[in-house]
Amino acid sequence: MILQKVNPFPALIALSVGWLLPGCIGQRSETVPQLPERPNMVFILADDMGYSDLGCYGAEVIQTPNLDRLAENGLRFTDFYNTGRCWPTRTSLLSGFYPHQVLSDPVDGIDYSSGSFAPVTESWLPSHLKKRGYRCYHSGKWHLFRRVPEYRVMTQQEIGFDRSYQTQDGRHLRPMILVENGDTLPLPDPRSGYEASKAIIDHSIKYLEEHAREHPDVPFFSYIAFIAPHFPLQAPEADIEPYLGSFDMGWNELRSLREENRKELGFRPDPVAPFEPERFAPWNLSREQLIREIDSAEVGYALPWSTLTAAQQDFQSTKMAIHAAMITRMDHEIGRYLNKLEELGYLNNTLIFFCSDNGASTEIMNRADRHAPGSRPGSADSYLCLGPGWSTAANTPFRLHKTWVHEGGIATPLVVHWPDGILAGGTFRHMPAHIVDIAPTLIELAGGDTEMLDGRVKAPGISLVPHLLEERSSSRPPLFFHHERKNAIRDGDWKAVTIEPGSDWELYNLSTDRGETLDLSAVERKKLEDMVSKWEEQRNRIEGQIRSGENQAGK
């Protein structure tokens, strides 16, 4: 049975869900013969959130009423993918190409210091939409840059945003730099109660009200990029307090509860990947550093919960309470934005997407303002990270974490809501889809041609527009993954993947094993060879595409 959810945030949720009351949402015509033209578009991106961290994807305690209601009246994609890391996902979202094609993520084996390289396109999603009459707004995290051949940060203006508010990683409660439309803003008073998710939505609402006032007949695209629940784990004390003690059952039991919840919600049951204590980010703090810099109760491995001391269990339970508080705060702020859409009359013809840039993170680091030993967990003076135990639970039922290209690193919830366009709310979409599909989807709905995306090569994504109306199979090129020298390819139900740089390829049939628990590489050699060959072809194709002089249309 699904664990009964006790609402720990009655006041918070009451403020955030005015738009959820009966009659406020989902009021649509009985028959909608075709998708409306030129809807408003909103893309909401979480940072380092696990696949099952939303109530509508299996969370047992974490309160996400606004996102759950979007799913109840919209669609949930079960097989949607990101790139496994922050900046590559943002690059793919806003370009419509794999990050390697626009020089945001290096391709292993290429010496970028020799020869000349060029991105396959200089056109970006907001620019495409502006050509078709849209106004474009950004609020939140940016983290968009080219890493090769030399590092260069892209600006919001050259990407095509009309208005932009920029925050930073690791600055949930005490910002150091805030930028609006290219200008540095004065920092808020430390006593002001600044909280990043709230500030991000404050500016999103400001741009929305400005749009309604100054451009009432123009459609808009809003890109809302939260930094929650990315480390450090920080939240107002009042947000954390209701969750304290809620995770005392530990990460092993939490994972079991989430898998049961997923079955109750209608997700296909999959074998659940076991905990892998030996797998964690190689740049994590050592055991000695954890004790010296963070707390003697910090744990750097996904050890069985029963083997932890009482002090360690209490410390770890508190960390997960902060993580939960950050997600609920984000959901609450999304509710404020939805209220404003409703108030201004935009909600019914606004297409809303929500997903995460990668899976939950195994990282445990100490940077930026750094951790003040003895500080209140979750305060601006603390610098705590989720770590591999809770990350494994957050990514239920999948294997591994952010930066890996196993399912735990690259699979994300995707909630899609559009009252005027989605006819059968509360349904699932099971076809494999990827963040590179978002740009062609939005451009098609804006009335544009998605074939080339104004690039020199054919874009790898497909439009999801037909899949908004009904569940259907789709013939598409294999999905390509490559990050930190870890490789993967998904072709239909089959996936080949490497767990570490230089390791042997593994092979899984995801139709029966999305938990990646049974490696079929030894018994399906021909299938593995075929998959690896397709990955290598794509890798070589990308190398040819980015070499100057070889950027030919259709390559």
Image: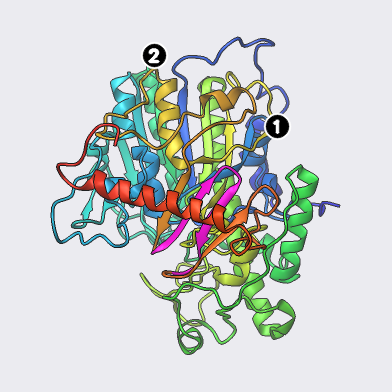
| Dominant SS in magenta | strand
Residue 496 position (above or below residue 454): below
- Between 154 and 441, the residue placed more toward the observer is 441
Residues at marks 1 and 2, CA–CA distance in whole angstroms: 31 Å
**Circle nearer the N terminus (1, 2):** 2
Q: Identify the residue shown where x is 30% and y is 24%.
A: 130
Please tell me whether mark 1 sits on a helix, a strand or a loop.
Answer: loop
- Between 425 and 525, the residue placed more toward the observer is 525
Residue 37 place in picture, x, y as percent:
47, 14
Q: Which residue position is annotated with label 1?
A: 426
Residue 352 place in picture, x, y as percent:
52, 32
Q: Do labels 1 and 2 touch, CB within 8 Å?
A: no
Q: Does the magenta-highlighted stretch encompass residue 486?
A: yes
Foreground disc of the pair 1, 2: 1
Residue 148 place in picture, x, y as percent:
23, 56
The numbered disc on residue 217 is 2
**Amino acid at the residue labelled 2:** Asp
First to last magenta residue range: 485-500
Q: Is residue 16 left or right of residue 206?
A: right
Count residues near mark 1 (Cα–Cα under 10 Å), then give few for <14, some for 14-19, many for 20+.
Answer: some
